[in-house]
Image (tube, rainbow, N blue to C red):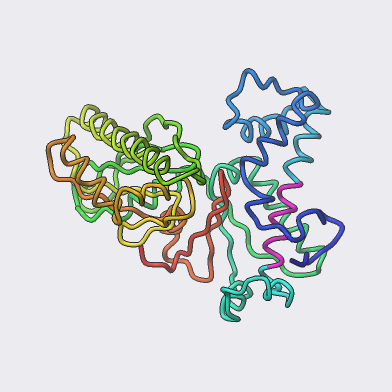
Amino acid sequence: MKLPVYGVDDEIEGLTVKEFFNAKLVIAAVKAHADELHIDLSSCHEKKLPRRLAQKAADETDESGAALARKMMMRFGDRLGLLLLALKLGEPENRAAREDWTDAHWEYWAQVRDIILVGGLASGLFGEILRERIEAVFALRGIAPYNILLYDNAAQAAVLGCASCIKARDGVFVVMDFGQTSIKRSYVVKCDGEITEVKTLESIASKNMEWVMPDEEERLRQAKELHAYLAAAVEQTFREAKQATKTQPGSEVIISVASYTVDGTLNDSRSGYAKLCALGSNYAELLAWELSGRLRCGIDVRLLHDGTAVALNFRRRRDTVCLSVGSYFGIGFPETKA
């Protein structure tokens, strides 16, 4: 509700983060300036446009296109910087706008030391520019910035966090990440309690990710379609893991999902996965039952919020927050128990 610094990007005052920072907005910006960027939209799927923008920013053969690409990426870095600075300062106008927060929430953000950026937009050059601009925005206010850390394998962070939750000491296990844009598929190998291999399989596109349904009948119809699609994706991953390793994967299937979840129950109003609540109160149990029938063996599914899954990679760190910047804006706290 109040920007900590004016003259950087005043247009975002009064907006929520989902209205000014996500991959969809980056995609829209690339489309709007494709000619100036010298990017052929027909040769690149729109979901890959943020990566294409970063590639253009590093293109030494196209000076004007590279300059514009860098300028566009810097704008998103400025926006992220303004958000983080507002959280750091906790000014009265912004506190008043968050009626669900107490002073303790703002005090928490004031004492946070490290911000770990993960997700598609935090990879490579894009991530480096985000960090540079965050630090620049803090400098304008004369405030010491958060320590912004970039994670080398940012796009796979949720999968790796999930892998750390496998309880069995030995075997092959399916680990997946149900995102808003894509479903990441993988399997891991454990030996004597240690993860010895993480194999990434080809990702598939997410489907039926609409949030708002015209009526309950359509919500249920799409929920059934989504459930069938997810079950088939896990089944296929299970079979590919078995074929590749010549080993029957274990019963534990760990899945991070772009939805808040508690003990297998999904949030029923946020994200494209919310519609799955129309099928039953506990989606982890429902998916486990479906997979057990498909695979003809007992399957135990564990769901984790994707932000929590990411944070598990850093569980020994204190005063640290993980920000996932991709299709949407997510958050995870390393001190949270999964």
Q: Nearer the viewer, residue 44 or 246?
A: 44
**Residue 9 at what x, y percent from top left?**
81, 53
Magenta span: chief secondary structure: helix
Q: Nearer the viewer, residue 225 or 110?
A: 225
**Residue 5 at what x, y percent from top left?**
81, 64
Q: Is residue 58 at least partly visible in the picture?
A: no
Q: Is residue 323 at least partly visible in the picture?
A: yes
The residue positioned 65% from the left and 40% from the top of the image is 125
In this rendering, position of residue 140 left or right of residue 148: right
**Residue 169 at what x, y percent from top left?**
20, 52
Query: Which range of residues does the magenta coloring cover?
Result: 75-86
Hey, which quadrant is residue 143 in on the image? bottom right
The residue positioned 72% from the left and 52% from the top of the image is 132
Residue situated furthest bottom in the rendering: 103
Q: Nearer the viewer, residue 325 or 1?
A: 1
State which quarter of the image contains the C terminus. Answer: bottom left
**Is 179 in the magenta?**
no
Vertical relation: 151 (above or below) 246 = below
The residue positioned 53% from the left and 71% from the top of the image is 319
